[in-house]
Amino acid sequence: MSEGNNKSGAFRLSRRRLLGRLGGAAALSLAAPLVLRRGRAEAASKNLVFVTWGGTYRSSVEEGLIKPFMAETGINVTVIDTPDLAKVKAQVTTGNVEWDIFDAPGALGTAGSKAGYWEPLSASLFDASDLSIPATKDLVPFYTFAGGIAYDPKRYPDGKYPKDFAEYFDANAFPGRRTFRNRPSETLEAALLADGVPPSKIYPLDVDRAFNALDRIKPSVAKWVDSTPQTITLLQTNEVDFSYSYASRVRTTAATGAGMAFSFAQTLNGLEYLAVLKNAPNKDSALKFVSYALQPARQAAVMELLGNTPNSKKAISMLSPATRKWLPDMTSDQNLIMDEWWWSDNFEKLSRRFKEWELS
Amino acid sequence: MTGVENPRAAAAYVSPAAIVSLAIAAVPLLFILFTSLGGSSFSLEAFKDLLSSALFRRSLLTTIEISVSASLISLALGYIVALHLARQSPRRRAIYMVLVLLPFWTSILVKSYAFTVILGREGLINSLLSWALGVHVALPMILNRFGVMVGMTNYLTPFIVFPVLASLLAIDPAIYRAADIMSARPPRIFFTITLPLSLPGVVAGLSSVVVMSLGFFIIPALLGGRQDMMLANLVDFYTRETLDWNMAAAIGVMLLIMVILLSAPALWMRRNQLVGRR
């Protein structure tokens, strides 16, 4: 309803008028999807909906990617918070697609690909020689994020904190309370690395061996963390001594002057993908956007703010030295890149086992 | 009470609300029921899976355990607060009610983080104790069941205070005067007048609090330990992480059945009251 309508209603509101107006509102809201859809079709090439994460993440992406894109192409981008795959499923299965581009953490990207929720991405959209990790038929890696050991260097100087997963799992040499994520992905990989499996031989995961290694560390785990910010806050409040967290998060926290550091001796690197929804209303613009997001200059501009590793090789050298200091050395054989495709086949079954193991 | 005694007139008053709630609640609920039964290809597979799953049974027990104990603690605390509020002058009561409402208006996420600061190993309480006793105290009060109880009780208590207060204020002061004239002592007055007459508020508050706590999600995730896994967390897992809506809906239906069973006593009590009045 228009504002003018509401205002005149506020002056004289007899019951009959109110009922009439409510009826009108109901009719309007029923007709709204039709009206909106027609409006959208007309402006199809000039509008895009991008679903991404909130907070400083959102402002970094807006600054480094969305504003330049809008300036260069004249296409307006609407940003929506929180990529939720359940909502993608609802949109695609009901044929009522409202989102165009989805900022997908590894597991969501591969799960959506298996379910057929993404449009194919043609190889011509990207410079294949520049991408560290190649695009698949419907997903392109946007960046990788490094998970690993966070600690307070004032309380635990060099030699006193666990620098890799073998030491993180050694509660005798490095006594203290620890965190892990409350899910099998990342946690089982860390357990196998700790147990001496080299990163190149991690997949397929030896699940029983991983759970055995986890049994050893279980008594020292103060919290199996559900929400990512808590990996930092628990460390800040001294609730735990060491925390499994992420380099980009630690970097932001350390920048505020809080005593916090991250060990780059060994990292678990997860992928973040970009995907275009199946039958996206503005498919052509969406494909253009995804291609634009992988250009070296844009990759560098966004990752300079986000603190993650760009997937464009050229972008890495464009980053400032201060930012590069916070990126893992991807040529080191101690670092692992997560295999989200393996997880998409095993996640549900292992999540059940993991949760049952936690309860026991 | 100037309530509507004629059921037909009552229906006229209730119907707009009933139509709205049917439209916005009943339709999605029917869809959830439909999804839990396997959608267009009818099957009880999801329910069979659930009942045979150790994970589901454990979470169900934990959920009931946490909900019931948090509700009872909230009732004990909320009743005392309501009793105190009922004895104040209206002006003071208004001020105190704002104090009850303040935490109620605060985001549950913010409150959970605030409790980390208050109850943590180096939080306010432990620091104060360490300072007072001269030894290092680090009582574990979060990341365990205790933390969940504190967080949930803090959230739920206002939902007890208001219905109980309404019942207490509805008690005719003449009854108290009569009891006083007959020289009844305070405990006697409480157990023969105040408590029985406040029961409708207690039942209303308690049942809504239990129902609410069955769906708790953030507080156990932030303040609980690894064993404090509630059904809402499982629903989230199936809805968003594995996209198995069949299972998610089946858990939802189970929760709904529990809620219906729990609201039965409240309905029954209300009916008795109406019948009693005639």
Image (spheres, rainbow, N blue to C red):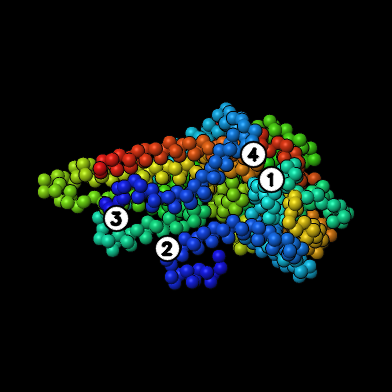
**Mark 2 or mark 1, earlier in chain:** 2
The amino acid type found where label 3 is placed reads Leu
Residue under label 4: B244
**Spot occupied by residue B178 in the image (x, y as percentages of width and height):** 14, 48
Q: Give the Cα distance between marks 2 and 3.
A: 38 Å
Say whether residue A357 is visible: no
Mark 4 Cα-neighbour bin, 10 Å: few <14, some 14–19, many ≥20: some
* Residue position marked by numbered label 3 in the rendering: B85
Three-letter residue code for mark 2: Arg
Label of residue B24 in the image: none
Which quadrant would residue A214 be assigned to in this image?
A: top right
Q: Are marks 4 and 2 on the same chain?
A: no
Label 1 is found on which chain of the structure? A
Mark 1 and mark 3 on one chain: no
Mark 1, residue position? A93
For the image shown, how many numbered marks are present on the structure? 4
Q: Where is residue A54 in the image (x, y as percent from the top left)?
A: 63, 58
Nearest the camera: B154 or B171? B171
On the image, numbered disc 2 is attached to which residue?
A15
4 and 2 marks in contact (CB < 8 Å): no
Residue drawn where x is 85% and y is 56% of the image: A126
Q: Considering only vertical position in the picture, is A168 above or below B100?
A: above
Gap in angstroms between the C-alphas marked 2 and 1: 42 Å
- Chain letter for mark 3: B
- Image quadrant where one finds the N terminus of chain A: bottom right
Q: Which of marks 1 and 3 is in front?
A: 1
x, y percent for residue A56: 64, 61
Q: Mark 4 lies on which chain?
A: B
